[in-house]
Image (cartoon, helix red, strand yellow):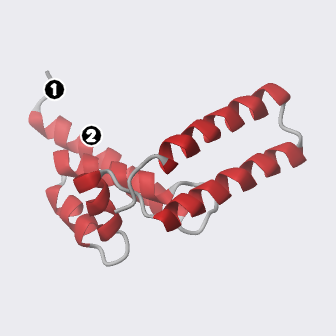
């Protein structure tokens, strides 16, 4: 078993890395902001409670994070945004000539994610 200090450091590293990638995702289309922020809050809850609370109280991202935690719900606007981005990603991969097996795998994965996402409650 790892010492407590090492475990906390690992959770904090995961939380910080997820947060940074999530912030990059706010300006880079295709990088999923909200799932990375969910991961940051989850990891923060295990090793950095102050970061977790900051994320949950954030004026822009906090409500969505709290809704996910409480009810597993995803707002309709987020579902549409994710679906549009996945579709644009698939089109871009086809246009740039990604290998057919990779395109098929990516599209199947995105279709499965979209199906799962649209089955989540909205409120």
What's the CA distance linking mark 2 and mark 1?
Answer: 10 Å
Question: Could you say where residue 102 lies in the image, as x and y percent from the top left?
Answer: 75, 30
Q: Is residue 3 above or below residue 30?
A: above
Q: Residues within 10 Å of mark 1 (few under 14, many from 20)?
A: few
Q: Residue at x 80, y 45 (%)?
A: 93
Disc 2: which residue? 10
Q: Which residue is drawn at 18% across and 42% down?
A: 8
Q: In which quarter of the image is the C terminus?
A: bottom left
Question: Could you say where residue 55 lies in the image, as x and y percent from the top left?
Answer: 28, 65
Q: In this view, does 40 lie above or below 105?
A: below
Q: Residues within 10 Å of mark 2 (few under 14, many from 20)?
A: some
Residue extending furthest toward the left: 4
Q: Is residue 21 above or below residue 62?
A: above
Q: Which corner quadrant of the image does residue 7 belong to?
A: top left
Left or right placement of residue 58 versus residue 82 in this view: left
Q: Is residue 87 above or below residue 62?
A: above
The secondary element bearing badge 1 is classed as: loop
Q: In which quarter of the image is the N terminus?
A: top left
Q: Which corner quadrant of the image does residue 10 belong to?
A: top left
Left or right placement of residue 95 versus residue 120 in this view: right
Disc 1: which residue? 2
The secondary element bearing badge 2 is classed as: helix
Q: Can residue 44 be seen in this view?
A: yes
Q: Are marks 2 and 1 in contact (CB under 8 Å)?
A: yes
Residue 15, numbered circle: none
Question: Could you say where residue 116 lies in the image, as x and y percent from the top left?
Answer: 49, 41
Task: Choose between 71 and 59: the one closer to the eye.
Answer: 71
Left or right placement of residue 69 versus residue 89 in this view: left
């Amino acid at each position: 078993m790892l010492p407590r200090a090492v475990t906390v450091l690992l959770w904090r590293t995961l939380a910080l890395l997820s947060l940074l990638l999530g912030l990059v995702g706010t300006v880079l289309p295709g990088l999923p902001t909200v799932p990375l922020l969910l991961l940051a809050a989850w990891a923060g809850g295990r090793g950095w409670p102050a970061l977790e609370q900051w994320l949950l109280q954030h004026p822009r991202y906090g409500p969505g994070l709290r809704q996910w935690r409480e009810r597993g719900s995803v707002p309709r606007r987020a579902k549409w945004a994710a679906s549009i981005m996945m579709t644009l990603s698939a089109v871009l991969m086809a246009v740039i000539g990604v290998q057919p097996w990779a395109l098929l795998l990516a599209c199947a994965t995105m279709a499965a994610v979209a199906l799962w996402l649209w089955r989540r409650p909205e409120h």
